[in-house]
Image: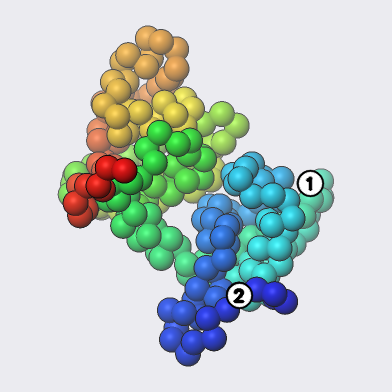
Amino acid sequence: MVGKRRYDDRCAVAHGLDLVGERWALLVVRDLLLGPKRFTDLRTGMPGASPDVLTQRLRELQAAGIVQRRKLAPPAGSWVYELTAWGSELEPIVTALGRWSSRSRSMPSGAPISVDSLMLSLRALFDPAAADGFAATVGLRLGEDRFRVRIEDGRIDVTRDDAVDADVTVDTDPAVLTALLHEGRRPAEAERSGELRLDGDRATARRFLKLFPLPEPAGPAADPE
C-alpha cells in the first residue's frame, strides 16, 4: 500500500477507514457481496473507476485480507475476485450505510443504479412490518442477471441464482424495477408497455413491490445556491 494515505490513529474507526475508506474500495466490497466477479464484471458495475484505479483498490483489499482472487474450475477457468470470510462481515455495515444515506435530501435520485446496488437496496430498505404474514419466493430477471429473493418470517434473503421455485418471476430492467418500487409506477401499465413481464401469481408480485418503502428524508432541506 505504498503511497496510500493513512490516518495513523489507534481508533478502530480510523483504522477501518484506512482499510476501506479509499475511493471505490467500499464499492468493490458492495459489488462482491452477492458473489464472486471477474475484473470485467467489476468494471461494468463501477464505470467511473479507471482500470488502473480499480486494480490498485483490489490489490489493497487483497493485502488487507478483505478480498481474495481465485481461478474457477474448468470449463470456465477464469479468474474471479471474492470476499474473504472476514470481508463478508462488512455486509451489515454496507447495508446500514445504504439505509442511512437513503434518507439524505441530496440523494441523486435521477442517477443510474447498477443491478447489484439495486439488489442490495432491497436488503437495506426491506420493511419487516409490511411483510407480516407474507411468505414467497420471487425471481428477478434483470437483463442477463438472475436473482432469487426469499421472504419469510419477516426476513429477506437475496441470492444471485435462477429462482426455479419462484411463486412469481419479474422480468424487467433495473430502471423499470426502480420505478415500480419507489416512483409509484403501476405494474399493469408497465406490462402493457412491454417493459415488464410477470410469470406467476400477480398478487404476490404486487405485495412484493410494496415491501421496500423509502424512508423519510432526514434533516433540513439544503439551502439553495
| Front of the two marks 2 and 1 | 2
Residue 223 numbered mark, or none: none
At horizontal 26% and vertical 26% (from top left) the residue drawn is: 184
Camera-side residue: 171 or 73? 171
Q: Secondary structure at mark 1?
A: loop
Left or right: 151 in relation to 90 = left
Image coordinates of residue 175 in percent, x first then y, are: 44, 29
On the question of residue 84 being in view, the answer is: no
At horizontal 78% and vertical 58% (from top left) the residue drawn is: 71
Image coordinates of residue 48 in percent, x first then y, are: 61, 45
Disc 2 from disc 1: Cα separation: 38 Å
Q: Earlier in the sequence, mark 2 or mark 1?
A: 2
Q: On screen, 63 above or below 136?
A: below
Q: Disc 1 marks which amino acid?
A: Ala
Image coordinates of residue 189 in percent, x first then y, are: 32, 14
Camera-side residue: 32 or 160? 32
Name, please, the residue furthest toward the bottom.
10
Verify CB contact (< 8 Å) between mark 2 and mark 1.
Answer: no
What quarter of the picture does the N terminus occupy?
A: bottom right
What quarter of the picture does the C terminus occupy?
A: top left
- Disc 2 crowd rating (10 Å Cα; few below 14, some 14-19, many 20+) is few
Count of labels in the image: 2
**Residue to which mark 2 is pinned:** 5
Camera-side residue: 82 or 107? 107
Name, please, the residue furthest toward the top.
192
**Residue to which mark 1 is pinned:** 76
Name, please, the residue furthest toward the front.
225
Q: On screen, 141 above or below 73?
A: above
Q: Secondary structure at mark 2?
A: loop
- Disc 1 crowd rating (10 Å Cα; few below 14, some 14-19, many 20+) is few
Image coordinates of residue 37 in percent, x first then y, are: 66, 51
